Amino acid sequence: MPRATYVSSDGTSTAVDVVDGTTLMRAAEANCIEGIVADCGGNMSCATCHIFVDPAFVDRLPPPSDTEDSMLDFTAAPRQPNSRLSCQVVMTGTLDGIVVRIADPQL
């Protein structure tokens, strides 16, 4: 099972196993990872699951959809080139070992 590591704003790292096909937002919720608010429940309408993907993994992800790209303009923490919404990042074996930093603030 692939693993993802979430890094909080205070630098705490938490590595979890993630079932293929699960979004990083759902995996964070299932593992009680703090910092990802996910107000909309993964419907891509709130931008409160903002993460920064480790540069080594950015090219392994499909590009953001037009909707995700637009929503990233409304994040509370300033958007960066490696910004993504964790509700749109679906775990696969290709992403095994992915490291994401949770954006702060989310609201």
Image: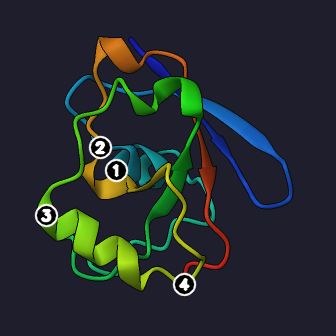
Could you say which disc has been placed on residue 23 in the image? 2
Query: Can the viewer see residue 42 in this picture?
Result: no
Residue at (24% x, 75% y) in the render: 70
Residue at the image position 55 percent from the left and 51 percent from the top = 52
- Secondary structure under tag 2 reads loop
Estimate how packed mark 1 is, as few (under 14), some (14 to 19) or many (20 or more) residues with alpha carbons within 10 Å.
Answer: many
Label 3 sits on what residue type? Asp
What's under tag 4, amino acid-wise? Ala
Return the residue found at the far front: 81
The residue carrying pointer 2 sits among few (fewer than 14), some (14 to 19) or many (20 or more) residues within 10 Å by Cα, namely many
Residue picked out by circle 4: 76
Q: Dot 3 corresponds to which residue?
A: 66
Check disc 1 and report the residue beneath it: 26
Q: Is residue 16 above or below residue 53?
A: above
Give residue 103's quadrant in the image.
bottom right
Q: Position of residue 80 (x, y in %)?
A: 54, 61
